[in-house]
Amino acid sequence: MPETFDLGRFALESGASLPARLVYATQGTLAEDGGNAVLVPSYYTGTSESYLPWIGPGRVLDTDRLFVVVVNMLGNGVSTSPSNAPEEVAGPRFPLVTVRDQVRAQRLLLDSLGVARLRLVLGWSMGAMQAYEWAVSYPDDVDALLPICGAARCSPHNLVFLEGVRAALTVDPAFDGGRYTAPPVAGLEAFGRVYAGWAYSRDFFHSGTYRELGYPNVQAVLDGWAADHAALDANDLLAMIGTWQSGDVGRGRPGGYEGALRSIRARTIVMPSTTDAYFTPADSAIEASLVRGAQLRPLVSELGHIAGRPGIRAAETTGVADRVRALLVC
Amino acid sequence: MPETFDLGRFALESGASLPARLVYATQGTLAEDGGNAVLVPSYYTGTSESYLPWIGPGRVLDTDRLFVVVVNMLGNGVSTSPSNAPEEVAGPRFPLVTVRDQVRAQRLLLDSLGVARLRLVLGWSMGAMQAYEWAVSYPDDVDALLPICGAARCSPHNLVFLEGVRAALTVDPAFDGGRYTAPPVAGLEAFGRVYAGWAYSRDFFHSGTYRELGYPNVQAVLDGWAADHAALDANDLLAMIGTWQSGDVGRGRPGGYEGALRSIRARTIVMPSTTDAYFTPADSAIEASLVRGAQLRPLVSELGHIAGRPGIRAAETTGVADRVRALLVC
């Protein structure tokens, strides 16, 4: 069952502050020496529940041995977000929460749980961005790092992709600068349709893999993404885009991006999807080359970015499980 | 100077008909034996003028030796299009014009010019789709074929990308099902912003190549694409998307897509950009393998799909010129 951690008035990098609560879930039992804690930050449009396919006895994250903490990032609609925040910071008044802010908030949560160090931090997509930021912010407290289809910063091409989906949503006048009283459904649907082309890959559509995911045809993929996004909150989606675009382990740090990656002490496996259109294998290769001793272990898949989504398919789940096992054996 | 060819009441594949005119331009002189004609069909948002950087004495298409015909495709805003058609077929009433319709219209134009066979048909992007269709529709009359960053059909991933830009435009209520009286500027701008992420590549943004193209930063790329598209006609843009999505040399032909490609008799060089996100090198490799004797000669470039745009940059122009030369030497 999800629990709540009150951050009080949480000071943000921007100078603003946010009356904030983190909603999180734990499974397993923290060892007496505290050496079995694993942190999994949520991803874009995901929640702590989204990681459930990986978590449990005998699963990717084996709760017979590990203490797994899954955190909803601020802005995701479950932790404090535009859609559920107190009036003063609700909707379009919600401040920018950076990836670094998210990680600092998660650190306070772990302190409250008595977790001083992490055996492993991992995540998919924006979860991977937060994992990188963890390993840079707290290099002495992270034993192992597994970023899956993610990056240590939002690349310029990734930023352009996000500006596209943002534009498709905000062109709907019903969005009204975030002050909508009813959901801007047309904008949300356009957002989903634009996103669908990025989430998968040429090979996914070429191979007809969408049928394995329950879509009878290509139009059903588009319509499914439109419908899924119509059910989400527009300001939450944009708040998380702000977080995503803020991601950069090097920002404001001596040595910048390269220096930050070189400062990581965690045993690291970098796992891009071979067909990811925005968290690209090329960027992952660079990042793996900058983290001392890191292994680049791509997930060979035609699923595009979606390859790393928890529970997506048995082959990809096995790939993730193999890397987790490699990092936990030491 | 552009000239006009009246197609009369042009019968379309769909069964509809269109009172249609092709606007085209020629340079050079048709040889007495008719053996030096080159056809270049226009591309998405391009006109016959867009190819000018390639055309002239000593250029990629050397008009001291070649008779070059550049045709504006129907729907592009210059030839008969939603924005300039007679009232009965104007705006949202404009019928679907398939790639095959375009090619048939161009054949009638060439007949009127006394061109019975083509030494070469080439084009970039949608121009390449029309070039493929030429080589399949008239296998005995096309000596050489050079599709640049294009394909013989619109792949399902390409279709999904196009549905994304369509959605970003049509979500603007000012579009009003195509019955707008003033341009749906917000929708057109969103269309341009979404498109920008697809037109280039990860490497383009990573390398900062946008500065070579006159964009000082990434935001300027987005704003430039938004402004460029705000100046275009929404119904024209959607008519051309319809044409694009209709592209398939195999549709309705015995043997389908593979059979159609195997039926090509033209000497063929298939030239994808190595970083094209929607007319992908993977699709080009398949198509090159299906055309008898075809060579796959990728244009190595970080410019993404834009690599093949006429006049984009000296290195890419040289690449195109080399392939043209290889096809014309015989």
Image (tube, coloured by chain):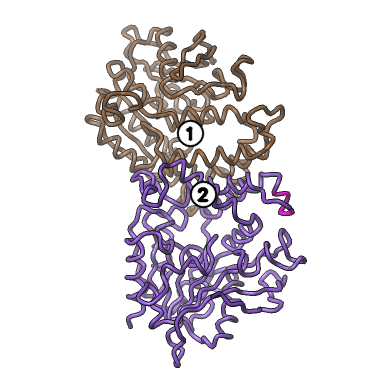
Chain colours: A purple, B brown
Which image quarter is the N terminus of chain A in?
Answer: bottom right
In the rendered structure, does residue A176 fall within the stretch colored magenta? yes
Which image quarter is the C terminus of chain A in?
Answer: bottom left
Residue in the image at 26% along x and 30% along y: B291
Question: From where the camera sits, is residue B317 visible?
Answer: yes
- Rendering coords of residue B130 (x, y %): 40, 25
Residue bearing mark 2 = A225
Chain for disc number 2:
A
Residue in the image at 54% along x and 77% along y: A137
- Rendering coords of residue A108 (x, y %): 60, 81
Chain for disc number 1:
B
Callout 2: SS: helix
Q: Is residue B315 above or below residue B137?
A: below
- Rendering coords of residue B71 (x, y %): 47, 19
Residue bearing mark 1 = B311
Are the two marked residues, 1 and 2, in contact with CB atoms closer than 8 angstroms? no
Question: From where the camera sits, is residue B225 visible?
Answer: no
Q: Looking at the rendered structure, which numbered label has been put on residue B237? A: none
Callout 1: SS: loop
Magenta residues, start to end:
A175-180
- Residue B17 lies left or right of residue A87; in this view the side is left
